Image (cartoon, rainbow, N blue to C red):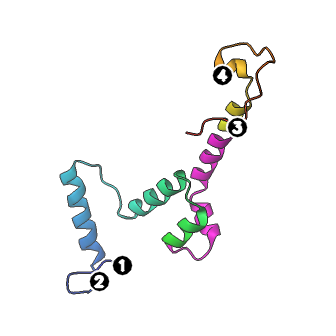
């Protein structure tokens, strides 16, 4: 909740007006104030913050709400994880450019982005 300097709730219309003015002065496209909340949660999820922590930060009563709202991000992260796994399991000749002569130990892991 946002308050005035006197501690009273800010009128939503005034908040929207002020936010829109700040966006215009910064040369940014118009977005809803609520979009900041969604962007923050998406960035946290993409950085590996646990869904339960994001749920608590957002104040969702149930993790299912958080999981549903951010399912598209989770699916993208799952695809990225599968791509990383596929890269780690590729033939060493594909990743190093050298043929595998069988004399080298198997790759034990892959770099993480």
Q: Please report whichever mark, 3 or 2, sits nearer to the chain's N-terminal start.
A: 2
Left-right relation of 42 to 7: right
Q: The residue tagged with tag 3: helix, strand or loop? A: helix
Residue situated in front as seen by the camera: 25 or 97: 97
Q: Please report contact status of discs 2 and 1: CB closer than 8 Å, yes or no.
A: yes
Q: Please report whichever mark, 1 or 3, sits nearer to the chain's N-terminal start.
A: 1
Q: Please report contact status of discs 4 and 1: CB closer than 8 Å, yes or no.
A: no
Is 5 one of the magenta-colored residues? no
* Nearer the camera: disc 4 or disc 2: 4
How far across and down, in percent of the image, does residue 80 sit?
A: 62, 41
Main SS of the magenta part reads helix
Residue situated in front as seen by the camera: 96 or 82: 96
Distance in Å between CA atoms under marks 2 and 1: 7 Å
The disc placed on residue 73 is: none
Distance in Å between CA atoms under marks 3 and 4: 13 Å
The residue that disc 1 covers is: 1
The residue that disc 2 covers is: 9
The residue stretch that appears in magenta: 59-82
Distance in Å between CA atoms under marks 4 and 1: 52 Å
How far across and down, in percent of the image, does residue 61 sit?
A: 58, 77
Mark 2 neighbour class, 10 Å CA radius: few under 14, some 14 to 19, many 20 or more:
few
The disc placed on residue 85 is: 3
Q: What residue sits 54% from the left and 56% below the top?
A: 45
Left-right relation of 58 to 12: right
**Farthest residue toward the right?**
102
Q: The residue tagged with tag 4: helix, strand or loop? A: helix
The disc placed on residue 95 is: 4
Distance in Å between CA atoms under marks 3 and 2: 50 Å
> Would you identify the image quadrant in which residue 21 lies?
bottom left
Figure quadrant of the N terminus? bottom left
């Amino acid at each position: 909740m946002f308050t005035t300097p006197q501690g009273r709730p800010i009128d939503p219309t005034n908040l929207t007006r002020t936010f829109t003015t700040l966006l215009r002065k910064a040369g940014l496209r118009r977005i809803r104030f609520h979009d900041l909340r969604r962007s923050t949660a998406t960035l946290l999820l993409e950085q590996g913050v646990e869904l339960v922590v994001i749920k608590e930060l957002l104040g969702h009563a149930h993790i299912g709400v958080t999981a549903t709202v951010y399912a598209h991000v989770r699916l993208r992260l799952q695809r990225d994880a599968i791509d990383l796994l596929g890269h780690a399991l590729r033939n060493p000749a594909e990743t190093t450019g050298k043929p595998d002569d069988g004399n080298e130990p198997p790759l034990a892991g892959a770099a993480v982005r």
